Image: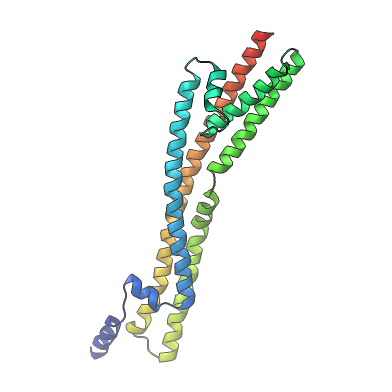
């Protein structure tokens, strides 16, 4: 009973709070904790940025589609957008209209061969525009995927190192009491907890944003096909 009371008293002198566990940890475990904490903060920053950005992009796409399908002139809509479109869908439309106007101004819509070539060029420039815009939308997705896949292993590394320190303490003191073992085990488990704290939101956010980004990309592709069909119909009417 006296040994148990002494162990409990010794354990009470150890600060087992989050700050205490960090301060009492080994240098390498501290480094792992700091890296995981920074990764967690970075993940939440990306999550908030991506959530707001995708919301704005979908709202802008809906607003552009309302103007596009309102029955107005495409040339007027292109003049309103100007040379600096504000969202990917507007940029895709502007790329196609720019190629269309260039061909029309040069009289390249007279023959059937030129019309077929023009349609292919319009499709190509719109596809390139979608690729550039989606590359910007997908920025930092690799970071989320990397954190989601590697943070648990990094936390596990800190756990293993902390347990090794605990066994070293046991060997050096020849004491297997809870007061000797518990602090090192707590530090080790804290590293694991930080790894999961960074990995779980990152993995969930990556899956959610991947779905949303793919859906938005499909929306741009569908618009590109519809716009190309409209230009093709205009070319047939001119013929």
Residue 215 position (above or below residue 11): above
Say which quadrant the C terminus sits in.
top right
Residue 220 position (above or below residue 195): above
Q: How is the image coloured?
A: rainbow
Q: Is residue 130 left or right of residue 216?
A: right
Q: Nearer the viewer, residue 1 or 153?
A: 153
Q: Is residue 161 left or right of residue 224?
A: left
Residue 104 location, x and y as percent? 68, 17
Residue 230, picture quadrant:
top right
Say which quadrant the N terminus sits in.
bottom left
Residue 164 location, x and y as percent? 47, 79
Residue 134 position (above or below residue 27): above
Q: For the point 42% across and 73% down, which residue is it?
A: 188
Q: For the point 64% across and 8% down, which residue is it?
A: 237
Q: Nearer the viewer, residue 17 or 233?
A: 233
Circle count: 0
Q: Nearer the viewer, residue 5 or 233?
A: 233
Residue 75 location, x and y as percent? 57, 19
Residue 101 location, x and y as percent? 65, 21
Q: Nearer the viewer, residue 98 or 50?
A: 98
Q: For the point 55% across and 27% down, which residue is it?
A: 222
Q: For the point 43% across and 55% down, which residue is it?
A: 200
């Amino acid at each position: 009973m006296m040994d148990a009371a002494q162990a409990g008293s010794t354990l009470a002198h150890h600060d087992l709070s989050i700050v205490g566990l960090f301060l009492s940890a080994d240098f390498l475990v501290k480094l792992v904790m700091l890296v995981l904490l920074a990764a967690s903060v970075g993940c939440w920053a990306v999550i908030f940025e991506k959530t707001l950005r995708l919301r704005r992009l979908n709202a802008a796409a809906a607003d552009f589609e309302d103007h596009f399908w309102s029955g107005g002139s495409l040339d007027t809509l292109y003049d309103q957008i100007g040379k600096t479109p504000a969202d990917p869908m507007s940029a895709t439309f502007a790329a196609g209209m720019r190629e269309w106007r260039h061909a029309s101004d040069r009289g390249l819509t007279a023959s059937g061969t030129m019309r077929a070539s023009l349609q292919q060029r319009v499709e190509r420039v719109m596809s390139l525009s979608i690729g550039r815009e989606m590359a910007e939308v997908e920025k930092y997705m690799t970071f989320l995927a990397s954190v989601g896949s590697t943070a648990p292993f990094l936390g596990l590394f800190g756990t293993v190192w902390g347990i090794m320190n605990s066994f070293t303490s046991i060997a050096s003191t020849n004491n297997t009491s809870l007061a000797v073992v518990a602090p090192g085990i707590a530090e080790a488990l804290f590293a694991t907890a930080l790894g999961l704290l960074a990995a779980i939101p990152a993995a969930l956010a990556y899956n959610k944003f991947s779905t949303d980004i793919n859906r938005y990309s499909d929306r741009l592709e569908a618009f590109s096909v519809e716009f190309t069909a409209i230009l093709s119909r205009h070319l047939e009417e001119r013929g």
